[in-house]
Amino acid sequence: MLDVRKLRVLREVEIHGTIAAAADALQYTPSAVSQQLAALQAEAGVTLLERVGRSVQLTAAGRRLVRHADEILSRLEEAEAELAAGDTVRGTVRVSAFQTAALALLPPAIEELGERHPDLRIEYTEAEAEESLPLLAAGELDLAIAEEYDYLPRPRDPRLHREELGRDPILVALPDSHRLARRGRPVPLAKLADEAWGSGRTDTLFADMILRACRGAGFEPDLQYRANDLQILLEFVAAGQAVSLAPGLGNPGAIPGVTALPAAGQSLGRTIFASVRRSSVRQPAVEVLLGALQAGAARLDQRLLAT
């Protein structure tokens, strides 16, 4: 009979590509991972792994076994959730979120839950959705807060359940001294074609969104400053060195020296959502955190809509 713990090890090797990385994720030693894999291969009676350079990859049989492992581990997680239903909320929930969502949503939710559920522990790691959603699907996180920009939908993973938290407008961030900032009206992006722009790093949807918005306005932006930290980009704007687009959730107009206005002629925005594995939706600790985030997002959404 195949051992569930060994199946989990095999899945981690597929995700991370090396035995050392899988060992790190599992908090095992590399030799322990190798022993588990050798034992699993003996139990299965087929070759599950082959070495490619310094990495390893699963054989066709190994990939088939991992698909079954995903189903088995999901069913076990569902069973644990059913057994825990109705019990005192306790345990650890591992959460990831990008910077602006984490700042706006997580501290009040954690504070509220700490008063109601003292045995609940929430661990947070900052990560963009490109990293956090695969980790969530792999079982290395329990909840991920992510974003989806207009015209740039994220692929839907059938293993994940998604709850929308709200709509976040995208604003044009200008130096206070800029001629269009002084008008105080929606800004035509085409009038910023000759400006230096701040944007996210090239591997993010935030950067793609800025590029698409500018191209939609008929020009290729001069992307002079790149950072995933919105505060850094807005400091360049405040210093008069750049213009940018910024999410309302980041409260760009509160930065001294920055004026934030809507874009003219096009609706720019993004959807904020929380994802959990379908197999863990009914786990009490996950349920209460998701509920607290939804309540906090509803209050925040009303504030954003009122601005």
Image (cartoon, rainbow, N blue to C red):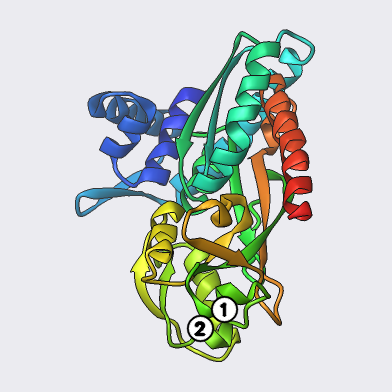
Q: Is residue 281 visible?
A: no
* Front position among marks 1 and 2: 1
Q: Quadrant of the C terminus?
A: bottom right
- Residue 92, position in %: x, y? 55, 19
Q: Looking at numbered disc 2 in the image, what kind of residue is underneath it?
A: Leu
- Residue 280, position in %: x, y? 67, 30
- Residue 217, position in %: x, y? 59, 87
Name the residue carrying label 1: 180
- The residue lying at 67 percent from left, 75 percent from top is 186
Left or right of 2 on screen, residue 273 = right
Label 1, label 2: how many angstroms apart (C-alpha)?
A: 9 Å
Secondary structure, mark 1, is helix
Secondary structure, mark 2, is helix
- Residue 244 circle label: none
Left or right of 219 on screen, residue 168 = right
The quarter of the displayed image where residue 197 is located: bottom left
Q: Residue furthest left?
A: 54
As drawn, 54 above or below 222: above
- The residue lying at 54 percent from left, 33 percent from top is 95
- The residue lying at 46 percent from left, 55 percent from top is 230
Left or right of 263 on screen, residue 86 = right
Name the residue carrying label 2: 192
As drawn, 291 above or below 269: above
Q: Are marks 1 and 2 in contact (CB under 8 Å)?
A: yes
